[in-house]
Every structure is written in structure tokens, then in C-alpha cells.
Image (cartoon, rainbow, N blue to C red):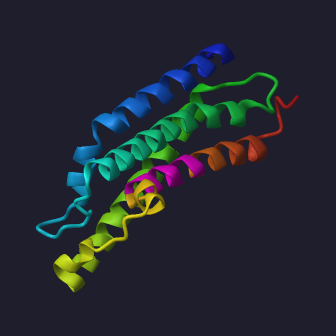
Amino acid sequence: MLPRGFVILLCLLLAGAGGWAGHRYFEHTVDFMNAGSVTLLVRLHGDARELARYSFAVAAGLLALSVPLSALVAARLRARAKYVEPLLVGLLIGLLTTSAALLYYRHEMQSLGIKFGELLSVMRDSRREIAFNPLTRSLLFGAALTLIGGLARGLVSPLSGKK
């Protein structure tokens, strides 16, 4: 059994590590999303690219934070909280939903790219569209579903051990 304080510390550490990894590996993720020779993401000026990088880093930090937070929520209604299993389930939900969302966006961009060719790179230069690009939205989707999974697990889990 993990103590609750350790899981709270894990929340802080994973949020920081997720933000760092999101900032560091943003370019690799953009390269993954660029399928073939079709320009899928706009070649933006430096400020817009940095805004996209920071929004991706924040979303990655939120995704990493949502895993131990969902375990805390899942174990909140129990007298003897067991955090290891909800942590693993939250990690699985987060990875699967984020991967599915990323692959969905990549597939949609490929199919649009095949239909429209290089004209796909036309996008308005607004801060909201840059900050909430498909990469960031997929990470936020995974974080939201991870938290919803932890809440559902806390509400639906067996009643034995309930406070």
C-alpha cells in the first residue's frame, strides 16, 4: 500500500515531469503528426510556435497530473485506500485515450491532406487556435477521461471498505 502523502507528492512530481517532457518533445510530436510530405501544421512565426509549445507542455503536465489525481479520487470513498491499482488503471486510461486521440487526428490530417494537398496548411493566426491545436486537445482529452475514469471507479467500486 502506498501512503496518501506519497501519491500527493507523485502528483507534483509527475506534473512537473509531464510539463518538461511536453516542452522538450514538442518538435518530435509535431514530426509524428506530419504524415508524408503534406504540411499538416502551419509553419508559424516564432511567437506562435512558442505559444503552441507552451500550451502542449501545460497539457502534458495536466495529463501526467491526472493519473495520480484520479487514483486519489478513486480511493477517496474507501476506508482503506489502495492506490496502486487505481494508479495503473489511470495510467492505462490516460495512455490509451491520448494515443487514440493522437492517432485519430493524424489519420484525419492524412485524409484531409490527400484530399486537399498542400492547401491544408491554411489556418487563421489566432491565439486560441494556436494554443488549442490538435496535439494539445488530444492531451486534454486524455486527462479529462482519466479523471472521469477515476471518479467512476470511486463511485462504482465495491461497497466493501466504504467509509
Camera-side residue of 76 and 107: 107
The quarter of the image holding the N terminus is top right
User: Relative to residue 127, is residue 49 drawn left or right?
Assistant: left
User: Relative to residue 80, is residue 20 drawn left or right?
Assistant: left
Above or below 49: residue 81: above
- Residue 137 among those drawn in magenta: yes
Above or below 23: residue 50: below
- Snapshot quadrant of residue 129: bottom left
Above or below 151: residue 126: below
The residue at 40%/60% (across/down) is: 134
The residue at 18%/80% (across/down) is: 117
Camera-side residue of 14 and 3: 14
The quarter of the image holding the C terminus is top right
Residue 108 position in % (x across, y down)? 33, 73
Specify the segment rendered in magenta: 135-144
Residue 119 position in % (x across, y down)? 22, 79
User: Relative to residue 148, is residue 24 drawn left or right?
Assistant: left
